Structures are given as structure tokens and as C-alpha cells.
Amino acid sequence: MNFPGWVILRLAPLTQALIDQDKAFKNFFEKRGKYPKFKSRYDRQAIRYQLDQRQIERTYQAGECLKLPKLGVLKLRWSHVPAGTPKMATVSKTPDGRYFVSFACAVAINPLPLTGQAIGVDLGIKDVAVSSDGWKSGNPRHLKSQLKHFKRQQRALARKQKGSHRRHRQRLKVARIHARIAAMRQDFLHKITTALVQRADVIAIEDLNVKGMLKNHHLAGAITDVGMGEFRRQIDYKAAWYGRQVIVVDRFAPTSKTCSHCGSYQQKCRCRFERGRVPIAIVAMIGISTQPTSF
């Protein structure tokens, strides 16, 4: 007899799915999200296991073994060995056909030593991040570097007959390009956010309206390739981990018109200090964010 896939599952993964559904409906009724819908089987799929702590020594050994109900012992390539004892294990399948296992562990993170430095960070397109001390991250433009190859594979996918085996293989090729671009962007953002958190105790960053910026269709592609929302998310949680302070500057604060040399607020400054992205949009951020200013 043929049974649906959910019949062979244990109770714990089904319970976790119901918890996720309950959160989705709660977010919808409290106006925090849209109405929940079923996931596509071509998108990321995930199943979450609650590990039994009474049998954890038999089912889990860090860097060596992981045994899950109905799946048995998994053959894993450990990219990172968890430091603590895992409470949850999530098995996920990406659109390009790869499988991953992630763990939820309780780990004590030690704060970084104090540096006595305070910097402001400005996000942009030419350079993803520019700090107030003149450091520039550059912009690798991950999407642009893969765009020619991506367009060719996307056109080949559009010509394939729906439901055919060749269309399925071509869909995996396109998904691999998407995954490669996302991985390169994620790796770059992790490197620059970690470097900023290690360099300063206080980080001032502007509260950008990214959704409004995307309405400019001439720059929308370049803005999304930067990953400004992901940059802000990584800065926030890494600062909380390592004992840093993040100051979010009001998006309506006149950072571009405030002189970082004399502090005056006008279109043309009398001190004739050289205006640019570093002295105005960043150093002014620190001045506005650390002390109240009236205009």
C-alpha cells in the first residue's frame, strides 16, 4: 500500500509543523504578515526534530554521528561542529537539491574586548559599507558577475516543455546559480559585519527605507544585490552577541547636510571643509546619534 509522506513521520516533526502554522496565523491576525499559504515543493523544504535528551548520547556525537527517527544514521560532512548539546535538529532541502542539517544549541558567547572606538557606517552601491574612519568595503557585485550566464540558463529553462525531465534538470541548473550568488553575498556580508563589530564598541547606522528605495527601478537591481536588510540583521545580532552597541539614526535626520568639521547645518559650509561621503554621511551620523540636536 502507498501511504502519504506524513504517515511515516513521528509525532515530534508534525507537532513542530503545527507550531509553525500557529505562528503564521497569529502573525496574520495581528497584522504582521499575509495569510499563510502552502509551500511550493520546488522551494526550500525543512523538517524539524526535537532531540530526546535522555537518549542524546546514543543518537548524537559531535562531529561523528547523528541518528534521527525514521532516517537512521545520516552520512554528514560536518562543516561546523556544534559547541553545545543540540536541542533541535532541522533537516532542510534547498531548491538546487542539496540537503543540510542545522542544530539549535545553548552556547555561552564571550564578549569581545573593548576597543574604545565609535564609528558610523554608511551603506551604498559603489561601496557596500563605508566607515567614518575612511575604511571602504568595496562591492563585488555578485549578481552582475553571474548575470550573463544566469540569463542564458534562464532562457534555456523558458524553452523547455513543462513537466519534462529536461525542464527539471534545467531548473536545477538555474537554482544552483541562484544558490551560488546567494552564498557569495552571504559570505561577503558576514566578513564585513564581523570586521566592523570587532573594530568598534559603538556602531551608528542609518535606518534606511529599503522598500522605498526599491521603487527606483533604475537602481533596484543594484540595491537588492547589496543586501542592506541582511547587513542590518547581521550587525544587530552580532553586536548583541559580543557586547557592542548599535545606534540607529533616524532616517529623516539631515546627515548629508550637516558638516562634520564645524557642525553647521546648511547647504554650503563656510569652513570650506571638503565634503564627501565619509565626512558628511558618516561622521555626522555619530554626532546626531550620540547627542540631541535641534534644527
Image (tube, rainbow, N blue to C red):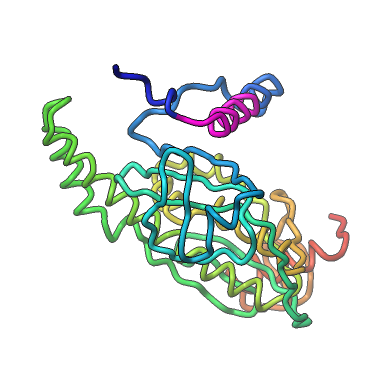
Q: From the top left corner, tell me how far across and down residue 236 is, in percent.
A: 68, 58
Q: Give the magenta part as a residue range.
A: 9-24
Work out whether residue 260 can be spotted: yes
The number of discs equals: 0
Which secondary structure type mostly characterizes the magenta part of the structure? helix
The one nearer the camera, 258 or 60, is: 60
Q: From the top left corner, tell me how far across and down residue 51 is, in percent.
A: 59, 46
Side of 11 relative to 219 (left or right): right
* Residue 22, image quadrant: top right
Q: Residue at x 39, y 58 (%)?
A: 76
* Residue 116, image quadrant: bottom right
Work out whether residue 259 can be spotted: no
Is residue 276 covered in magenta? no
Side of 76 relative to 274 (left or right): left
The one nearer the camera, 82 or 93, is: 82
Looking at the rendering, in which quadrant would you find the N terminus? top left
Q: Is residue 60 above or below residue 261?
A: above
Q: Residue at x 41, y 46 (%)?
A: 72
View extreme (top): residue: 1
The one nearer the camera, 12 or 73, is: 73
Looking at the rendering, in which quadrant would you find the C terminus? bottom right
Q: From the top left corner, tell me how far across and down residue 283 is, in percent.
A: 70, 71
Q: Is residue 168 above or below residue 274?
A: above
Side of 269 relative to 178 (left or right): right
